[in-house]
Image: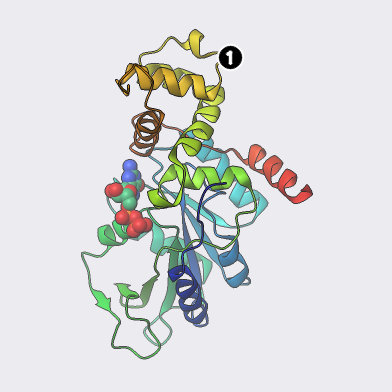
Amino acid sequence: MAIQWFPGHMNKARKDVAERLKDIDVVIELLDARLPASSANPMLARMAKGKPRLMILNKQDLADPAITEQWLAWYRAKTQTEALGMDAGERAPAQRLIAACRALAPTRSGLEKPLRVLICGIPNVGKSTLINSMSSRKIAKTGNMPGVTKNEQRIILEDDFELYDTPGMLWPKIEVEEGGYNLAASGAVGRNAMDEEEVALELLKYLLVHYRADLAARYKLDEETLEGMQDWQALELIGKRRGAVLSGGRINMQKAAEIVLTDFRDGQTGRITLERPDEWAAWEKRAKAI
Ligand code: GDP
């Protein structure tokens, strides 16, 4: 796939997280509810082995609510990991988050043994937004604390509850091809690092199967016309509809791709989730067989 995946500074982020994990009680991983499995960091899963974990499916306002329910149930049943849905509109996220973490590490409380929680996630998953909404309270920049990296933040959510923020992190190797495309579609990867047309075509391929009605409504197309259409034909049609036309009448596929990706990211195409638990299991199985 045409994505330059692992920029150099991610290596530093990985080392910082590994160091910080040593005295952490609970690890929160912020996932994108539109792509929960693709946005879960396999490297973090290995590094945090043995620690209680909480998965937060963020941006749930943009995701397909029925599929979010499937994922929350899947996490609890299949991985015995606590999972919560969340979005930026939530009024008091700190309360739910604190309660869930305390339940995962009941022995840690009091000023002597504050609960130390690390929050991780891919770039653009909404970590800063969530943290800002929680920290009308004290935010401690921890640059001057021994053993704490400069750009790491420590947020005191309650006197005995400390949240450590980490830089957005990717991982070196994408195992599941669909996962790479979904991450790229979500905006986790810088635009210079991917071929937008390729990513938009993969996105359209999925939408044509699972969200044809949303696609038709967004671009004022006839749902029946979309049936049986190839991804590139749909991209052309959307380009035409939106005036992405070059001189001579050819469709500007790059522009059309940008439109499709931006609409998806902003939730304009509808509440869409790009993977379901059973689909992910099949993709993973195929990737392992290769
Ligand atoms: P970070 O890179 O993980 O810190 O991500 P940001 O907090 O900067 O968020 C990335 C983008 O997603 C911003 O445009 C946010 O406004 C948006 N965003 C964050 N959380 C949500 C959410 O729950 N719902 C929606 N619709 N957008 C969100």
Secondary structure beneath dot 1 equals loop
Name the residue: 34% across, 36% down: 262
Q: Which residue, as the protein is rendered here, is positioned at the far left?
A: 136
Name the residue: 51% across, 27% down: 207
> Which quadrant of the structure image shows residue 96?
bottom left
- Label tally: 1
Whether the residue carrying mark 1 lies under 8 Å from ligand 1 is answered with no
Residue 142 x/y as whole percent: 30, 81
Residue 186 higher or lower than 158, as above or below: above
Residue 216 higher or lower than 261, as above or below: above
Name the residue: 21% across, 64% down: 136
> Which quadrant of the structure image shows residue 276?
top right
> Which quadrant of the structure image shows residue 161?
bottom left
Q: Is residue 156 left or right of residue 125?
A: left
Residue 22 x/y as whole percent: 52, 82
Along the viewing direction, whichever of 170 and 259 lies nearer the viewer: 259
Q: Amino acid at mark 1?
A: Gly
Residue 83 x/y as whole percent: 51, 53
Q: Which residue is mark 1?
A: 228
Along the viewing direction, whichever of 180 and 106 lies nearer the viewer: 180
Q: Which residue, as the protein is rendered here, is positioned at the far right?
A: 289
Along the viewing direction, whichever of 21 and 251 lies nearer the viewer: 251
